[in-house]
Amino acid sequence: MPTPADRGPGQPWRPGTPVPLALAPDTPTADIRIGYARCSTLTQELQSQLDALAKHGIPRDKVFSEKISTRVRVRPQFEAALAPARQIEAHAPHCRVIFTVYEMKRLGRDAAELTAHGLVLQMLAGPLPGMYGPSGPGRLPFAFFAAMAETERENIRESTL
């Protein structure tokens, strides 16, 4: 059952709220995959992450990569990766966007940004590889991974200082 756009967790039901229209049976639905690869320094290599993303069927034009520290607040390629996700969300809400990274630490503190856009997170490696959605049963692990990425970033910062 589709949920109205203004209805979410913690929001009360309002009598008279129109039920969203069901999708026509011939409406195409698809998973749209976006890949993101990042390393913290210019001397680190990205190729192994790019190869892993390509191996999982993500087209090269949908893979965004950069060599930039998580200390930097604005990461241009991360923002560029979110741009098509926003467009898909606006123009094809029936399609699921899967944001794929090699491992959680590639996102750093920006994992929460994925939740805001309703993206499904896929991790290819790390302690718990798999797909995690921002709602339903995947919501708790998704929030946990976002918090762990933030904590890992803070631990790295403390160790460096």
Image: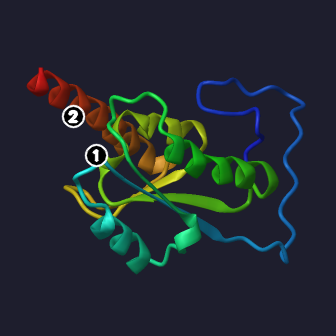
Measured as percent of width and height from the top left, residue 157 is found at 19, 25
Residue 84 in view of the camera? yes
* Residue toward you, 76 or 98: 76
Which element is circle 2 on?
Answer: helix
Check the picture and name the quadrant holding the C terminus: top left
* Residue toward you, 126 or 55: 55
Q: Residue at x 61, y 42 (%)?
A: 117
Which element is circle 1 on?
Answer: helix
* Residue toward you, 142 or 155: 155
The kind of residue on which mark 2 rests is: Glu
Q: Contact, CB < 8 Å: mark 1 with mark 2?
A: yes
- The disc, 1 or 2, on the residue closer to the chain's N-terminal end is 1
Q: Which residue is mark 1?
A: 105
Q: Residue at x 57, y 65 (%)?
A: 62
Does 133 sit above or below residue 51?
A: above
Check the picture and name the quadrant holding the N terminus: bottom right
Residue 147 lies in what quarter of the image? Answer: top left
Q: Which residue is mark 2?
A: 152
The kind of residue on which mark 1 rests is: Lys
Circle 2 residues within 10 Å: few <14, some 14–19, many ≥20: some
Q: Is residue 90 left or right of residue 116?
A: right
Does 10 sit above or below residue 143?
A: above
Q: Is residue 160 left or right of residue 12?
A: left
The CA span between labels 1 and 2 is: 8 Å
Residue 135 in view of the camera? no
Measured as percent of width and height from the top left, residue 84 is found at 67, 54
What sort of colour scheme is used for the picture?
Answer: rainbow
Residue 69, disc:
none
Circle 1 residues within 10 Å: few <14, some 14–19, many ≥20: many
Measured as percent of width and height from the top left, residue 118 is found at 59, 45
Q: Residue at x 34, y 72 (%)?
A: 52
Q: Residue at x 51, y 48 (%)?
A: 77
